Image: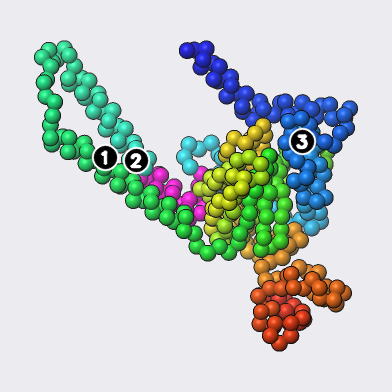
Amino acid sequence: MKYIGWAIALAAASLTPAAAQAPANAPSANAPAAAQPTAAPGDHTRPEALPPGSQPTPPGGFAQNANQPEPGTAVPTMAPTPGIGEPDGRMMLQDQVTPIGEEAATFHDYWLLPLCAIISVFVLGLLLWAMIRYRRSANPVPSRNSHNTTIEVIWTLVPVLILVAIAIPSIRLLRHTYSPPPADLTVKVTGHQWYWSYEYPENGVTFDSYMLKEANDPTRQKNQRARTDADGPPLLAVDERLVIPQGKVVKFIVTADDVIHSFAVPAFWIKQDANPGQLHEAWVKVDRPGVYFGQCSELCGARHGFMPIAVEVVPPAQYAAWVASKGGHMPGAQPAAAPAAPASAGGTGTDTVTPAPAAAGTDAANPAPAPQNSNVANRTNQ
Ligand SMILES: [Cu+2]
């Protein structure tokens, strides 16, 4: 049996990300000699899945994100707060910053955990009492009792009541989780081997998010910047954070491109499987600005442990600035270059980006870009 245990332990160790990365890194040592842009055997990162303009994934390394803003135009990123939204060695749950997280943590900390502790202590006490009180040396003649109606009713009813006491707050929490308020913003989250991509359909922003490697990591490519403390802890910092506005209801639509991943951010109480071909939902409303870290939580391949998630919650005005820095636009607003388009392009492209006010203007004059633009300008100034 001991050898079987060791065999299982060895097999498990070979599945850990640190061990699994070793063969993936091996081809990078040969990269200068081979100098092939194609993916190494076993490297399942597909170059065609990258956004246009991205560089192909180097063997054994992460692709550099072409959407990274220019140094001059980048919006300053927030430094994480130690102990908030990241592991800090504590035994209990991370501080929760969403309504669902707060409700769930309260349920866990003040109801489930004490209840489990009381039941465990009570059962242990019963066992010890029965072992000592009814030991053979003190009871040479065994009892021949086989039924006691009173105690049978008690040990049936009490567990039922305990289960009901757990089920009521538990089902209430599930109801709150799956009946979200109307979303202010929707973000599509797609898991890939081994990075995340985020899409903001209402803002016209799409980008990939890769883990930042350490400065002394030999597998780090020259054009990849190294992690700093301002980015976050090792193995959790990313080059492009998922940015969401503070105090807004954000709906995540979670899916995957290749295998099953899991989008998990402990401080948000989110752990949502990302399945290829399926759309799952999760939602958050975070009132506290900050940086919150998570990880893929479904064993998804060799570099499963190297596809972290970093969510930056910023005030709405800063969110709008971030969207602009990514070349996107706020809902209802048009991209900055759009007002010039009708004059030069003859109005051909205006219909595709016409927001709601166009419906009011269609009756009077269909191709009327000027009033639309003035409406948009007014709303953007508000
Ligand atoms: Cu994954």
Depth order, front residue of 49/241: 49
Residue 61, numbered label? 3
109 relative to 310 in the view: left or right: left
Label 2, residues with CA under 10 Å away: few <14, some 14-19, many ≥20: few
Q: To which quarter of the image does residue 361 belong?
A: bottom right
Depth order, front residue of 236/95: 236
Identity of the residue drawn at 68% across and 49% down: 197
Depth order, front residue of 213/196: 196
Which stretch is magenta? 94-111
Q: Is mark 3 within 8 Å of ligand 1?
A: no
Callout 1 amino acid: Pro
Whether residues under marks 2 and 3 lie with C-beta atoms below 8 angstroms apart, the answer is no
Q: Say if the magenta span includes residue 195.
A: no
Q: Secondary structure at mark 2?
A: helix
As drawn, which residue projects farthest toward the front?
Answer: 277
Camera-near label (2 vs 1) is: 1
Q: Secondary structure at mark 3?
A: loop
Q: Which residue is mark 1?
A: 159
Q: Which residue is mark 2?
A: 114
Identity of the residue drawn at 88% across and 32% down: 35
User: With respect to residue 279, does 228 lie above or below?
Assistant: above
